Amino acid sequence: MTKITKDVIAYIAHLSRLELEPHEVDLYTEQIDRILLYMDKLNSIDTADIDPTSHVVPLYSALRDDTVRSSLSIDDATKNAPKQRGNFFEVPPIIEIEE
Amino acid sequence: MDNILDMTIRELGDLLKKRKISSVELTRFFLDRIKKYDSDLQSYLNITEGYALKMAEDADKRIDGGDNGIILGIPMGIKDIFCTRGIETTCASQILKGFVPPYDATVIQRLKANGYVHLGRLNMDEFAMGSSTENSSFQVTKNPWDIKRIPGGSSGGSAAAVAAGLCVASLGTDTGGSIRQPASLCGVVGLKPTYGRVSRYGLIAFASSLDQIGPITRNVSDCAGLLSIIAGHDPMDSTSIPEPVPDYTAYLGRDIKGMRIGIPQEYFIEGMEKDVKQAIEASIALLERNGASPVNISLPHTEYAVATYYIICTAEASSNLARYDGVKYGLRVDGKDIIDMYKKTRFRGFGREVKRRIILGTYVLSSGYYDAYYRKASKVRTLIRRDFENAFSQCDIMITPVSPTTAFMVGERMDDPLTMYLSDICTIPVNLAGLPAISLPCGFDHSNLPIGLQIIGRPLDEARILQVAYAFEKERGVKRIPDRYMQ
């Protein structure tokens, strides 16, 4: 029995913003199918009354005084950007503007 | 100078303070060794010679001024995953090639404040995803005990460099065994502290509910010394535990009489190599001769740990790695619109294993599958954690193997991700439960490949782990540098 199809892998790749080549879709379909079949073993455990664990240590709300502190300069924060202009990261147009 | 490789950090520190050697000389000694030996080992991605010598000069000045830190003037190699101001940091990924962090990770700040010398960045599996270091986008690191074999992963560059004497010590990260498994396969000491013990501010994230930073060293004393420097609360990491840090070195040399050692039966699985099993049994016998009492315990949900882990870690990775979009740093590949740019950038920038995990993680979090996979795994994680809580009522520490096999051949498991995942069966449950655990050398197999012993402790009980590890190491005395690196 298979758990996953090529169409699903292609759709998930789109959600993940990953371009895949056709041979990669084939490869991942086969490999992820095997991995998901292996993960089915979890279904043999009854977890109806079990709370999920998302963190193993109690998380505290890390509060601090609202004081002004120095932070990265704009130059430092933007200097690694592949494209920048002035104080901004530059990206391709997101919203089409009608003339 | 060759006996430098047999010395602890403390002993080297004494030489430095007595001016028997300067930090600059010590740094040159390791830079020369890297030039001599790393061309076939391939553990370093980048050697920062000028930067290292400058740090060494500064350390010598501090020593002249009477400064007295544990790692002052000590040359270290660092896994390529910690943001280091002004030093390219890539996580062994094409997508971060050329990224020069504008700030230091907290662990790097602490090492700098204590005067370490930065020799260079060490290879790893891309984004720490892997068990062999073969997933690096740049090079394949070899095992110093047999260069046809892998060093383990993901901190394979760190473990190989420490094992071959190409640095005094290193820092690694461990999400499912990435410190302990390479330490085991390379015959060195590697400690994964309790989740939250070491700040992860500035650590490039893989799976945030599992990742932890720890030392990789040639002996237990160095491990304890380094941990006391990097451990402790940090307001910059909300998962950092606000508990005081004990002086770990103070526990070294204390006897282990009466210590109850739990032996989880589920870890002695089918498929474990005979030599590994025998080495672990001999190790338990050694601890018993030194006054410890073995008790059989059970961790009944162990067989579900790998499935649970690969749901949780891929889910978290798919979210963490969404930030690599070609906008703020790293690679950008132009496309016809912004979505196309994201897709092309991520296609070109990520390697095969990283893409596989992003897809798997996105799938287990996607609408209609979330309950069946992610929620289910989070519940099983509770059961795995409870197994440890229950078992620790009968024992003080646990002893297990680190890896069911010794180092495998380069290329052997690359086409079979599931088999590669299953090689982490003994280390993964510890991360799911957030516990501290060490890997230390306990023998060799019939091919002269190192075997590692895992000691697991209660939350924040690193001191007891180090106490037992030190007692073991003192008695066992394992040879650490392979002959080919002593010529």
Image (cartoon, coloured by chain):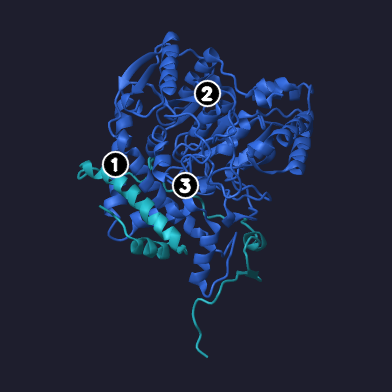
Q: Which label was assigned to residue B380?
A: 1
Please name the amino acid that badge 2 sits on.
Ser
Chain B: drawing colour: blue
Position of B310 relative to B474 (above/below): below
Q: Which label was assigned to residue B447?
A: 2
Name the chain under label 2.
Answer: B
Q: Nearer the viewer, mark 3 or mark 2?
A: 2
Q: Residues within 10 Å of mark 1 (few under 14, many from 20)?
A: many
Q: Residue at x 36, y 15 (%)?
A: B294
Q: Quadrant of residue B48?
A: top right
Please name the amino acid that badge 1 sits on.
Val
Lateral position of residue B242 relative to residue B36, left or right: left
Q: Which residue is mark 3?
A: B238
Percent position (x, y) of residue B250? 55, 20
Percent position (x, y) of residue B91? 57, 48
State which chain is coloured cyan: A
Q: Nearer the viewer, mark 1 or mark 3?
A: 1
Residues B195 and A71: in front is B195
